[in-house]
Image (cartoon, rainbow, N blue to C red):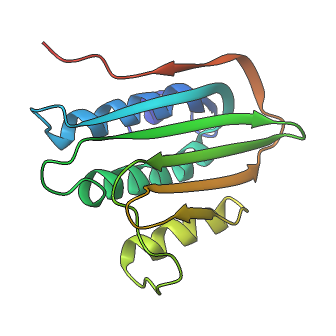
Amino acid sequence: HERLSRSESGGSIDLGEYLRELTNTLSSARGDPMRRIHVEDLLASVEVDASLAVTVGLLVNELVMNALKHAFPGERRGRVLVELKVLPGSRLRLTVEDDGVGLALGVPREGLGTTLVEGLSSQLGGKPELVSAPGAGLRFVLEFAVSAPGSRGRAEPHAPSPKA
């Protein structure tokens, strides 16, 4: 919210930087003193409207928090990856995946989180693709259009640095 409020109303924001700050915050806020779960990112630098960044941020927040809460029960270790790629034709691909316990697809899910993910995906104009199997993690992929994104540089892998 702080980063978004710094951009002018109706202005643009670097979505990759915004998502990096968000994933770092989520990773730190979760409280994982044993460092069992690593949240990593591979994020392209792309300027988007602040309103689009809010929608994508809410979606990433929900997906990452679900992974942190449910994908690694007990003492299970693992990784959550958030990736943003710029595609041809003013499109972006958002991927959030984990190597946790996975879930059985095809089972109806009617919780608030499912409704939120579906609604935000629809708001972005995309249809999410979920790939999972029990014991094999979960992969969420969403492609969506943006109005003339300005891509700068390349996506760089990044893992949050441990706090001293």
Q: At which x and y percent is residue 148?
A: 84, 36
- Asked if one can make out residue 143 in the rendered structure from this viewpoint, the answer is yes
Task: Write the residue at 28% across / 50% down.
Answer: 68
The quarter of the displayed image where residue 26 is located: top left
Relative to 10, 7 lies left or right: left
Is 121 drawn above or below residue 142 in the view shown? below
Residue located at (37% from left, 61% from top)? 135
Horizontal relation, residue 113 to residue 163: left or right: right
Q: Quadrant of the C terminus?
A: top left
What residue do we see at 52% from left, 25% from top?
17
Tell how many labels.
0
Residue 23 vs residue 51, the one in the foreground: 23
- Which of 24 and 39 lies nearest the eye of the viewer? 39
Residue 2 visible? The answer is: no
Up the image or down, 55 lies above or below 93; here it is below
- Residue at the spot 53% in from the left edge and 54% down from the top edge: 139
Task: Out of 48 and 140, give the one closest to the viewer.
Answer: 140
Q: Quadrant of the N terminus?
A: top left
Query: Where in the figure is residue 112, as x and y percent of width and height?
Result: 37, 76
Q: Quadrant of residue 101?
A: bottom left
Of residue 142 and residue 116, the one placed in the foreground of this image is 142
Q: Is residue 128 left or right of residue 117?
A: right
